[in-house]
Amino acid sequence: MQKSLARIAVACTLAVVPLASCYDFHLQGPEDPSPVGPRLVDVTIEYRQLQGCLNVSASCDAPVWFSASWMLEGGQFRLTRDATGYIWRGVAKAVPVNFPPRDDPHAVRVWDPHLEQYPSGGATAERLTVGGQLLTRFVSEDHPDVAAHVHIDDNGFGHNPY
């Protein structure tokens, strides 16, 4: 009888030991899955306007506007003129990251009222810096006054396409 009591005591002890510790079913790491979709960053924009306005039909004091291929219709925004009068700056919000290159580069440009009489109607990508990168790769090498290509990295820095 003592042997069966000893067996019961051992069985009870073995049954209680796992219950004494709280078994945690939660694994290490985030509880929710990471969001699916593009990574988005803010990117600085800088444009150097030509000195001297060639526009004879409208005001040369009109603002410079920035637009890009990732923006929805109407998403373009005004750049702010600095104290020199010829440098325009702004920040593009929520720009999709596409560097290292894994898809097409973004197309970017500004509309400059000083250049409205040009065949491009004032659109240009010359003298445009995106994410600290002066752009040198244009949509069409024959017409750098239309748009340029750029890749944006996780830090908001621009990269000319290779």
Image (spheres, helix red, strand yellow):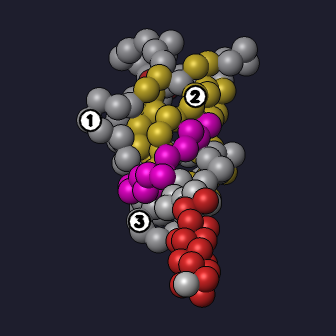
Which quadrant of the figure contains the C terminus?
bottom right
Mark toward the start of the polypeptide (2 vs 1)? 1
Residue 73, given in percent of the width and then of the height, sits at 26, 35
Q: Position of residue 30 (x, y in %)?
A: 53, 54
Q: Which residues are magenta?
A: 31-44
Please state which amino acid type lies under the numbered disc 1.
Glu
At 56% across and 66% down in the image, what residue appears? 16
Decide: few, some or many residues near mark 1? Use Cα within 10 Å; few <14, some 14-19, many ≥20. few
Type of residue at label 3? Asp
In the rendered image, which quarter is residue 153 located in?
bottom right
Please report whichever mark, 3 or 1, sits nearer to the chain's N-terminal start.
1
The image shows residue 42, relative to residue 69, as above or below, that is: above
Residue at (53% x, 24% y) in the render? 79
Q: Which quadrant is home to the N terminus?
A: bottom right
Q: Which mark is residue 73?
A: 1
Task: Check residue 104 in the rendering and tell me which mark sits there, or answer none.
Answer: 3
Give the prevailing secondary structure in the magenta stretch. loop
Q: Which residue is mark 2?
A: 90
118 falls in the magenta region:
no
Residue at 41% across, 37% down: 67
Q: Report helix, strand or loop for mark 2.
A: strand
